[in-house]
Image (cartoon, grey):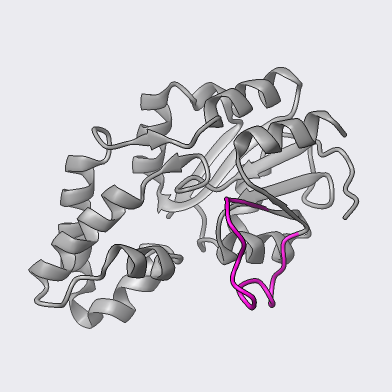
Amino acid sequence: MSVSRPKALIFDWDNTLVDTWPVIHAALHATFTAMGQKPWTLAETKSRVRLAMRESFPILFGDRWTEARDVFYEAYERLHIERLVTREGAGEALSGLKDAGFYLAVVSNKTGGILRTEAEHLGWTGYFGQVIGAGDAARDKPAPDPVALALDGSGIAAGEDVWMVGDSGVDMEIAHATGLVPVLLRGGTPAADEFDAFPPRLHLADCRALLDMVKGL
């Protein structure tokens, strides 16, 4: 499918630029255990974690969701830096795109403060015009609000000049909601009906493939 050269790329964070499934799973395991619920398997964590905490935890834990939130954050903040792993080629791709003059930003459903701590730890803060996490906008992804914040100050309007790059249906959904080009970035073949509602325009296997694609346009 044909696409034109973008002016900006907005990235998801977890499991798009960094591999955080192990730490997310460990923190959720501690949370479910503390709340007296059966912990998910790693496969269940990967398939079910999509929405921001302020949307998903009330569904999972009802009136005790703020208690569960505190348990999760304690576990996550204890583990996340020591277990933080970048996706293969991510740093190279960000550096190459930044050097080529593209505007880059992050829109994630990870809590904003934790997200920015991780970006700073990796030395990636300078690549991004904005790093927007859960709680930074009035509503979280897939609502369109974070995209406006991500493009703030760039002089670039939401539309076909902007790619939304992520690994999940929520990323494709926010791209469709805001008129961005939805780009699925992950290996493997999606399930037959996984993206029926919000299909990606492009599917690239990894960060190096993304860099090659964009620079070749």
Residue ranking furthest to the front: 188
Whole-percent x, y for residue 25 in the image: 27, 57
Identify the residue at image location x=37%, y=35%: 85
Q: Is residue 97 above or below residue 190?
A: above
Q: Is residue 98 above or below residue 70?
A: above
* Count of marks placed on residues: 0
Q: Residue 30, can we see it? A: yes
Q: Is residue 33 left or right of residue 195?
A: left
Q: Is residue 192 left or right of residue 181?
A: left
Q: Residue 144, can we see it? A: no
In front: 196, or 80?
Answer: 196
| The image quarter in which residue 141 lies | bottom right
Tell me, yes or no, whether the highlighted magenta stretch contains residue 195.
yes
Q: Quadrant of the N terminus?
A: bottom right
Magenta-drawn stretch, dominant element (helix, strand or loop): loop
Which residues lie in the magenta part?
184-200
In front: 76, or 216?
Answer: 216
Tell me, yes or no, whether the highlighted magenta stretch contains residue 51.
no
Identify the residue at image location x=19%, y=71%: 39
Residue ranking furthest to the top: 99
In front: 55, or 145?
Answer: 55
Whole-percent x, y for residue 152 in the image: 66, 40
Q: Quadrant of the C terminus?
A: top right
Q: Is residue 154 left or right of residue 143?
A: right
Whole-percent x, y for residue 146 in the image: 58, 53
Identify the residue at image location x=61%, y=37%: 207
Whole-percent x, y for residue 26 in the image: 21, 54
